[in-house]
Amino acid sequence: MEDKITLNESVTMTVHSNHLFYSNKKKVEDLLSEKDLDNNNLIDIFFSLHLVLELGINNIFRHIVSTDFKKQIDRHKLEKNIDNISFIEKTILFIYLSKFNFSDVDKATNYHKIIEKMRSFSGIRNKLFHGHSISEISKDGITSKSELKKKLNTDNLQKQIDDFNFITEGLSFYLRNLETTFTEAGIEQLINTYLTFDFIINK
């Protein structure tokens, strides 16, 4: 799938493949429409929801930095260097180093929590990605679960969804208050492309 983002009067960026982003959004949407979720469903949702957030944020910051950057540096080399920074570190740098004109300082202070929530949000996915044990051990009629196995439940799923919504809302707020060369329409296009959560059906 191809996305064409018009950022300002002189810059339009075409992203030729956002397959991972859109396919994982669709996977989350389809799985959440199921009545009963087993452990495998939960694993897929935790993993895919994280991918959607990470890919969306990386796309946004790639657009922002490469468009507003003033030095004459090859755009693809610049993007490669940006891509080597984790999406959480990108967010921290964005919040602390960008210039904003906040319409509501209290909201800005509240949305600062997205940094902490992003670290928490990434926890389950990182354990899944690195192959942490998902197991139960039964002995003498007593069953114990591994740490990751305990996290695979609908309560933690709802927390992930709530954190996803808060993070995307917070980043949207910061983007709308950012001092940038982007047009208002360009900012809204980025938000509507990469920070929407209308595909999430709360369980």
Image (cartoon, rainbow, N blue to C red):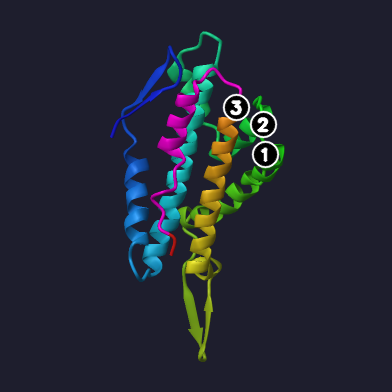
For the point 71% across and 41% down, the residue is: 106
The stretch in magenta equals: 179-201
Q: Could you tell me if the residues under marks 1 and 2 are in contact, i.e. CB atoms within 8 Å?
A: yes
Closest to the observer, 31 or 10: 10
* Of labels 2 and 3, the one closer to you: 2
Q: Is residue 80 visible?
A: no
Secondary structure under badge 1?
helix
The vertical placement of 69 against 160, above or below, is: above
Q: Are marks 2 and 3 in contact (CB under 8 Å)?
A: no
Which numbered dot is residue 201? Answer: none
- The residue shown at (43%, 19%) is 76
Rendered view: 56 above or below 36 = above
- Asked whether residue 197 is drawn in magenta, I would say yes
For mark 1, does the 10 Å Cα neighbourhood hold few (<14), some (14 to 19), or many (20 or more) residues? some
Determine the image quadrant of residue 107.
top right
In 3D space, how far apart are the residues under numbered discs 2 and 3 (Cα atoms)? 8 Å
Q: Quadrant of residue 144?
A: bottom right
Q: Position of residue 169 (x, y in %)?
A: 54, 43
- Type of the residue with mark 2: Phe
Q: Please give the residue where the numbered disc 3 appears in the rendered image.
A: 178
Sequence-wise first label, 1 or 2: 2
Secondary structure found at label 2: loop
x%, y% of residue 85?
55, 33
| Residue hosting label 2 | 102
As drawn, which residue projects farthest toward the front? Answer: 103
Q: Is residue 189 visible?
A: yes
- Count neighbours of disc 3 (C-alpha within 10 A) and say few if under 14, some if 14 to 19, many if 20 or more: some
| Residue 108 badge | 1
SS at circle 3: loop
